[in-house]
Amino acid sequence: MKIEIRNGRFIDPKHGIDRVTTLYIAAGKVAAIGAAPALWNANRTIDASGLVVCPGLIDISARLREPGFEYKATLESEMAAAVAGGVTSLACPPDTDPPLDEPGLVQMLKHRARSLNQAHVYPIGALTVGLKGEALTEMGELTDAGCVAFSQAEAPLVDTQVLYRALQYAATFGYRVWLRPQDPYIGRGGVAHDGEVATRLGLTAIPPSAETIALAMIFTLVRETGVPVHLCRLSTAEGVAMIRAARKDGLPVTCDVAVHHLHLCDVDIGWFDTQCHLVPPLRSTRDRAALRAGLADGTVDLVCSDHTPVDDDGKQVPFGESEPGATGLELLLPLTLKWAAEDAVALPAALARITSAPAAMLGLDAGHLAVGQSADVCIFDPNAHWLVEPRALKSQGKNTPFLGLEVPGRVRCTLVGGQVVYEA
Amino acid sequence: MRNPQLDAHGELTHLLTLEGLPADVIVRILDTAVPFTSIAERDVKKVPLLRGKAVFNLFFENSTRTRTTFEIAAKRLSADVINLNIGASSTTKGETLLDTVDNLCAMNADMFVVRHAQSGAPHLIAAHLNRTGRTHVHVVNAGDGRHAHPTQGLLDLFTIRHYKRDFRNLTVAIVGDVLHSRVARSLIHGLTTLGTPEVRAVGPQTLLPTALSALGVRVCNDMREGIKDCDVVVMLRLQNERMHGALLPSAGEFFKHYGLTPEKLAYAKPDAIVMHPGPMNRGVEIDSAVADSDRAVILPQVTFGIAVRMAVLSMLAGN
């Protein structure tokens, strides 16, 4: 199969390319850019005039809900959502049921995903058995099975000795450790940011110190062990400032933000809108501004969707009892474009946050389109706006705070390994 | 964002919170309650305003006083009252809150009086009824989590107005566990909406929510400073489970600092009234010498509460 993607605005952030050109794909790989290879004869031509052609997006946190939560979503529904959102590679956190703490579970997930022939799936293994924070998992076996990093997902790791040893053990073999900084005690039982909204609505609060206490603790361990750590889902201005300072000191830490937190704050909870019940909680406008600035200046390395399909049963309950999370695979690109447009970030720089930067975080040779590279491509119309509504979403989770709003950026075509897997 | 308890014409369709309720609506409820106070003194304590209407008391959290006063209010309006004490455990038995509501709607409920341990539960029910086009069914919040207890707030306002006439020259102190208090939140919104120039929240930092000043409240940690020259002192109930542990060391120490004694009350104005939403903990938040004095208007609050609830139910039924 030879495919020619003609006259699109080709943006490859990693290689600093941004020009109107034609991309030639053969045998699943990029065959040439600009000039056709010798004896070229395309089976299919895609006219990308007026569209952006870029590397397929990479999302480092997308819950597929398998195994264990198939009533919320299935691999089929969520993989369709991924490619509809232009996402060609994704990493899924280990908070399934059972958690991804055994090689067999990881192999099964990889196998199921591969058979669907859509986006590439990279499981994140559980750092501790059952995510209980007590005993280390067999990280070597899990890596052989396909895990690309290890985390506790949202489960706390209370025992600092276990965390210390987990970092040391992982570092021995070069495994990546991802941690979400949240002290398990100070915001215990909390569901919203400790601010005016929580005070007004009488919601149990999570103070910003829940994040900063955990960051200080993790930085101490990183400084002592020299082990690199990736910090997931920052939410506070203080947290961003601490990361900036830590990096200036040369600590090997990286971090990300969920795309919802670039646009929403606690005020959006309104009268108990459970769609805005997220983890970490939506914080103040000041925090949101700091996250956006941090992402622009590189303190925050990348954006992810933190895709979490939740069914109505999980959301049509009182706020404090509702299940946190929002569907996000199909909104990662639109909401990143929205941030870029509002903060005057150039399109290539914005796309780097969802292509080359997450690829680096996963240690993948992906997220770019050099000649010879697997042709994972996203073609989108940056000027088309669309209405977020349940029927517009492929994901089984229709839970998003953006329901009823228009967002920019419509994916027209997604290719994985040179195959067209989505067209609209 | 439209206030979810008002219809497109600004009329009250649910009573969920006093926050965001226009001053004229609050005043109208208080005015409506005035004639109802005399009904209890008649031989026939009934008016036919809610005849043929089914009022469901939907209590997911234990309550004796509030449920009883709502029951009396509805019965004096000639409504059929159905009491459901569902308890917090029912949600774990499988039926969701909204399924329960749908089932009771199928039994032709006209009004739900809802108490729930979770903040926002009555909002959820009201939004569900609005979304499914059942706008003739009304929801009254009888206390949700820490969020709101609007009929208590209204009866407190009624009591203050009864004794002090005008809100616009008053200083009101609310003392105790504001953090966990829906009563305090509702009263704060009501007072600020009606133009009370100074509302104070008095208590230790552990029992005051972080952003209280954003609600237009002056925060005082010292009791004497907090009730100095007050016209109204509202004492909040301290729940048993908060009396020990990390919020407070002991009930005795709380009483020492914040318990209302005649000595502390002397800092307020000589004609200051003392209120309490009940049930009182004598010797914890209030000294018997104060509770039983002529300064205390705690029992009139209870009587006014029935009239205020009659006003709310009758206004909702009329809209």
Image (cartoon, coloured by chain):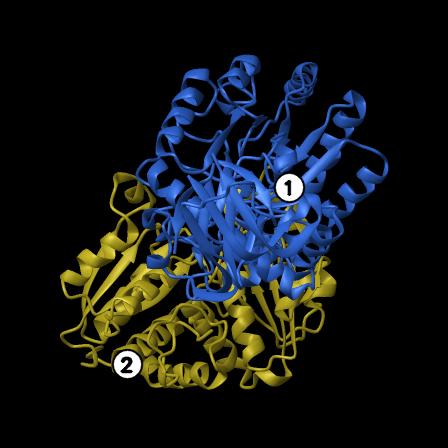
Neighbours of disc 1 within 10 Å: few (<14), some (14-19), many (20+):
many
- Mark number displayed over residue B75: none
**Three-letter code, disc 1:** Ser
- How many numbered marks, from 0 up? 2
Report whether B96 appears left or right of B286. Answer: left
From this view, report whether residue B50 is shown above or below residue A311.
below
Chain to which mark 2 belongs: B
Where disc 2 sits, the SS reads helix
Name the residue rendered at 65%, 41% in the picture.
Answer: A357
Report whether B278 appears left or right of A67. Answer: right
Judging by the rendered image, the residue that carries numbered circle 2 is B39
Chain drawn blue, letter? A
From this view, report whether residue B244 is shown above or below residue A35.
above
- Mark number displayed over residue A356: 1
Q: Contact (CB < 8 A) between labels 1 and 2?
A: no
**Three-letter code, disc 2:** Ile
The image quadrant of residue A244 is: top right
| Quarter that holds the C terminus of chain A | bottom left
Chain to which mark 1 belongs: A
User: Where residue B289 appears, x then y in whole percent?
Assistant: 57, 59
Closest to the observer, A419 or A221: A419
Chain drawn yellow, letter? B
